[in-house]
Every structure is written in structure tokens, then in C-alpha cells.
Image (cartoon, helix red, strand yellow):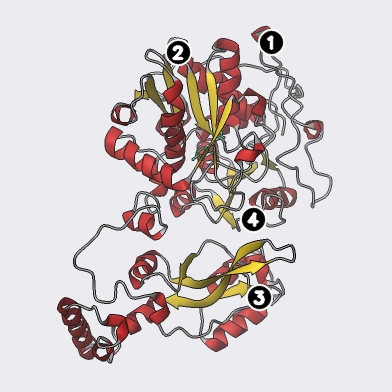
Amino acid sequence: MACVFTSNKTIRVCPFLNGDVENPEPKTNTTWIHPNLPSKCTWKPGKSISESPHNCVPLPKEPKILSNILEKIGHTPLVRINKISKAYGLKCELLAKCEYFNAGGSVKDRITLRMLEDAEKAGILKPGDTIIEPTSGNTGIGLALAAAVKGYRCIIVMPEKMSMEKVDILRALGAEIVRTPCTRFDAPESNVRVAWKLKNEIPNSHVLDQYRNASNPLAHYDTTAEEILEQCDGKVDMIVAGAGTGGTITGIARKMKEKCPECKIVGVDPEGSIVALPSSLNTAEDATMEVEGIGHDFIPTVLDRAVIDQWCKSNDTDSFLMARRLIREEGLLCGGSAGSAMSVAVKAAKQLKEGQRCVVILPDSVRNYMSKFLNDKWMITNGFLKEDVQEHYPWWWNIKVQKLNLLAPLTLLPDVNCQKAIEILRDKGYDQAPVVAESGLILGMVTLSNILSSLLAGSAQFSTPVIKVIYQQFSKISLDDTLGKLSHILENDHFAIVVHELEQYNADGSSFMKQMVFGVVTAVDLLSFVTRKNNSQKLNDGTLKSASSEMKRSLAECEKKTEDF
Ligand SMILES: Cc1ncc(COP(=O)(O)O)c(C=O)c1O
């Protein structure tokens, strides 16, 4: 997709982009454009602004009456952080750029508007066309919002990991949503590849491609960075921002290198991602990342790592705890990646002196994560928060999952086809089954409703192997976890996979931990344990020797209720 255009509508080949820009149309319907092709941008720090290869748009003034909601994109507030800054003993001024005040609720509204309008100006996008985008959600919301206002069809391809809140907002905005498994970016079923596959099949459709589109960093170069400079009277000493596509940090950093070259740019990259430099920082490559919107297993084309002065790794726990603190102590209703940036900023800004200024980008709002990090139970279940020590737990609370009478699980091999999987599940009376490799390794989960929706959406046929319709966003619990933890999980999920970890050795003597499926546990298993008639008898065995009289009372109550039932 080209994105910098002259007024007579001929495409000025954007040096940010790669060679595909002159011929953006794929030749066959299997073609896709890699989101990590090397950039051909000729922009260099130290050159004068007049030598810039980029087409720049001046920062518009905010109108008094908006002609539509898209004019409420940009001009976001810069807010002083008070209590947290004090708690960390910072001498400098700590400021938050609150991007969740954009019309669609995130920093991505800026780039979606710019990418759309640049494509419209170039005559690439025409009324009634379809926009397709692979995204972690916020770009999707920005595009769906602009598509709703401007009248385009919008298809968003999003990994399963992303929150249901984002899905519901996208639906409300009229977008069509395709969910993909969380796989490597270049796997055939990744959201990037599925988006290109749809583009190759749907006439008059376009992938604006935030990973390669120069309008992405340019939106931040022209607006976010200009606003920060205006709000700080040109004096900024440090900027801290996370990198997803890298558009935000690249655009801001390039403007700072030109207008405020002393400003230090700190990039935030979550553990599990490979974006940070030096690459020795990226140690935990297989760590799972719960924070959404930042981190990748490839280097996006638009990310210019040459303009980032320092990279710092963030982790999920610090990110979520800091995001909750920003809400609780500063009243900033931000998302998890805002917590990542701030958790890094409070450490990095220690090097700044009194009178200096650190600006932190808060990309989106807690609105996207109401059922996730805002929820205490979710935090506890996922190990990000310790449980309060309550005095009145039910008697079964601290009993281990291994005490449940779980049946050996029904598992499917990855090459079982959907037709056969439906028959097996139906015959055995199950709604779901783990899909495991011959080695016993868990590959994912397949459910009847998942198979059904893939068949209806046309993304799978009866002959398709189940490996194509599995999903990986399910809760796991170990045999040593408590039934209390299990009950938290089952408040949100229909089931959890009971896993058993074993250490396996390679021929070279190195070892790794391998997770095997021990069973699938549902609310019925927990309830039948809790209400089992002979529980009072069990109170006398070793497991429950320590049971208090209160536990016995609650058990008796429980049994009574079962009898009444
Ligand atoms: C929540 C959140 N934080 C941070 C970012 C990073 O922005 P960028 O893609 O400009 O690097 C994104 C991008 O999707 C996001 O959704």
C-alpha cells in the first residue's frame, strides 16, 4: 500500500516502504506481503527538515463544532503524574500523554485516519470498498470507526488472545471479525496471512498494512510528536513508549531527533518479544505475553530501531500492577500497555534531574480490559495478584486438584478431521477435547462450537484437520493447584486443562519442561466433588485432618442442599 502522495495523485514512492509499493497487487491468491521486509526509507537523523523525504501535514487546530467524530482524533491531554512520581522519588517532571482520549479510545485512531485518508487521496480507496487489517484490536477499532463514518466495509483479523471487549466494540461498529490462533506471524493461519488471503479473495479490498505503511509513523511524526512539543514548549528530555508496529515510537523519535535532539527515546518491549536491542535483552523468547498491543516475533518494517536510544524490557506483572496504580492513584483509566510504559519510565526517569521532563505514552483505555486486568479474580487466577488472606474459605478451598476424580482425558491427534472430531465428541458426550501431538504435547483445544463456527465461516471444511481449528487461549491448572484457584477459573471459563509438567532431557544433556494433559476439568467435576455424599467421611481422612469445625458445618450445609435438590 502506498501512502505518501503528491497532490496530482501520482504515487510518490515512499522511501519508508519496500519494493512492493510500485506493484502492491499480489499476483496470485497465495501471495502475502511480509510485515518485516527491510525498510527502504532514506530518512536519517541529523539531516535538516527540508531534506526529509516525507510529505508532512501541519497540525490542525481543533474546531469548535466537529463535522464528525473523526475530528476528535489527536489533541490528547498531557497530564502530570503526581503520587506515583513521588513514590518512586523522581526528581524530574513525569507526564502522561493520554491517548485513550482519542475518538476510538486509542493511539491507533491517528494512524487509521491517516492511512485511510492518504489512500483516498491517492485514489486507491473508493466508496464501497472493503478494508481488511490484521491487528491486535486497536487499529481495528480505529479503522472500524472511520469505516462506519465514511461508509466502507471493514474486516478485522485478530488473534484469539485479544480481549472480548475489543471484539464487542468492533461488532458494535459494524466490523466483521475473523479470529485466528496465536501462532508465529508467518504461519499460514496467522492473522497477517489470513488478512492477505481474504484480500486476495474479496474484490475491491485493501490491506492498509500498518506494519509497512509509512502513514503509520508519519501520523505520529506530524501529530503526536508535534502536540508533545507544543504542550512542553519544545522542552522534553525523555520519551518512553511501547512498540507494537513501532509506528508510534518511530514517528515521535524522528521528530524529536529533528526538533529536540537531546531528548532520549526509550523503547519498551515485553518479555517474550524479540524487538529490543541489543538482542541479548530478549532472553525469555517463549514467555507468554498477556499485555496486548506491544511486542512481536518479527521486526515490523515501519519500526526504525536506529532512532531508539535505549530499549527496556517490561513484564506482565509489573505492567498490570502499574496500570492499576495509574487508575487508583492518578485517576488515569488506561490499559495494560500503558502500565508497561510507566513501569519502565519510573526506573528510566531516575537518571533525569529536577527541571527535566519525561513523557510517557499511554496507548489505550481500561475499557478494553474490563474482564482482564481490571478484574481481581482474573489477576489472581493468572498469578499477577496474591489472594487476600480471607478467614472464611469453604472447606474445599485449599484441597488440591489431584483429589478430584478426573477421568482420563479424551484427546485428538492433530490430523483427525473435523467430521470425525464431531462424531467422536458427540458419541462420547463431550463438548471439547485437547488436541495433542503423538508425543503428548498439548497443541490446543477444539470445541464443537469452534468447529461449527469455522465450518459456517467457510474457513474449514469437514475434511479439514482439527489442528486448523484449534485455539490456544484456554486456562491451565496443575494437579498441585487448589480447588479455590480452579473455582476462580471456572467463573469465567467453561473448563480448564489439568496439566502435568515433566522435565525432558535432550541427547546433548540439555533439558526443557514439557506440559502433558492430565485431564479436562469442568464446573460439574468441582460441584460433584463439593457435594459428594461421603464427604463427611472424607473429613476424617488424612487430606482433611486440619478441617475446622466451620468446614464441617459448611459441608453439612452443602450436603443438605444436595439432598433437597
Ligand atoms: C494497547 C497498545 N499499546 C501500544 C501499541 C503500540 O503502538 P505501535 O503499533 O504504534 O507501536 C498498540 C498498538 O497496537 C496498542 O494496541
Element at label 3: helix
User: Relative to residue 67, is residue 302 drawn left or right?
Assistant: right
Of badges 3 and 4, the one in the foreground is 4
Q: Is mark 3 within 8 Å of ligand 1?
A: no
> What residue sits 62% from the left and 41% below the top?
128
SS for dot 4:
loop
Q: Position of 262 compared to 531: left or right?
A: right
How far, Cα to Cα, is label 3 from label 4? 20 Å
- Tell whether label 1 touches label 4 (CB within 8 Å): no
How far apart marks 4 and 1 lie (CA) works out to 40 Å
N-terminal label among 2 and 3: 2
Q: Amino acid at mark 2?
A: Glu
N-terminal of the pair, mark 1 or mark 2, is 1
Residue under label 3, please give it: 418
Three-letter amino acid code at disc 3? Cys
Q: Which residue is mark 2?
A: 230
Discs 3, 1 touching: Cβ within 8 Å: no
Measuring from the top left, give residue 521's x and y in whole percent.
44, 76
- List the residue tagged with mark 1: 47
| The C terminus lies in quadrant | bottom left
